[in-house]
Amino acid sequence: MLFRGLVFGGLVRWGFWPAALLSGVGFSMAHIDPGTFIPFTLIGMALAWVYWSTGSLWDAIIAHSLFNTTSFLLLLSRV
């Protein structure tokens, strides 16, 4: 809700791409893992697109949950 609703929503007046990039970078930095900076920036931008294209924050929340669930299941499969 923070990055899609507040950050992206507040910056979208600058255009989709600048808002998506800045909110994606913030999303990535919040995870505090330098090794995931680029992939999580891209995921953050994709989640911004989901929110922007559907107009629903819930769709972005569900997409984020699916990403986390998939990542967790992949992690478990490596054990």
Image: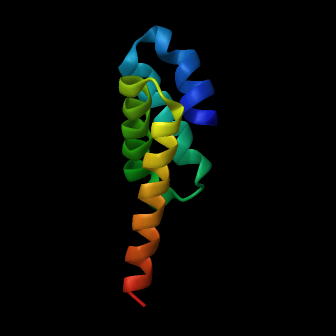
Is residue 67 left or right of 5 when viewed as pictured?
left
Above or below — where is 31 with respect to 9? Answer: below
Please give the name of the residue rendered at 58% of the width and 34% of the height, measured from the top-left corner. 3
**Quadrant in the picture for residue 79:** bottom left
Residue, x 36% and y 39% (percent of image)? 46
Q: Nearer the viewer, residue 35 or 5?
A: 5
Q: Position of residue 35 (x, y in %)?
A: 45, 61
Q: Position of residue 53 (x, y in %)?
A: 35, 25
Can you say whether 34 is above or below 30 in the image? below
At 52% from the left and 32% from the top, the residue drawn is 57
Residue at the extreme top: 13
- Residue at screen point 44% across, 83% down: 76
Residue 66, placed above or below residue 12: below
Relative placement, left or right, of 39 versus 29 is: left
Which residue is nearer to you in this view: 16 or 51?
51
Vertical placement of residue 71 versus 45, above or below: below
What's the colour scheme? rainbow
Residue 36 appears in which quarter of the rendering? bottom left
Residue 7 percent coordinates (x, y): 59, 26
Q: Which quadrant of the rendered structure holds the N terminus? A: top right
Which is more toward the observer, 68 or 15?
A: 68
Q: Is residue 60 left or right of residue 49?
A: right
Residue at the bottom extreme, as displayed: 79
- Number of numbered discs overlaid on the protein picture: 0
Q: Quadrant of residue 15?
A: top left
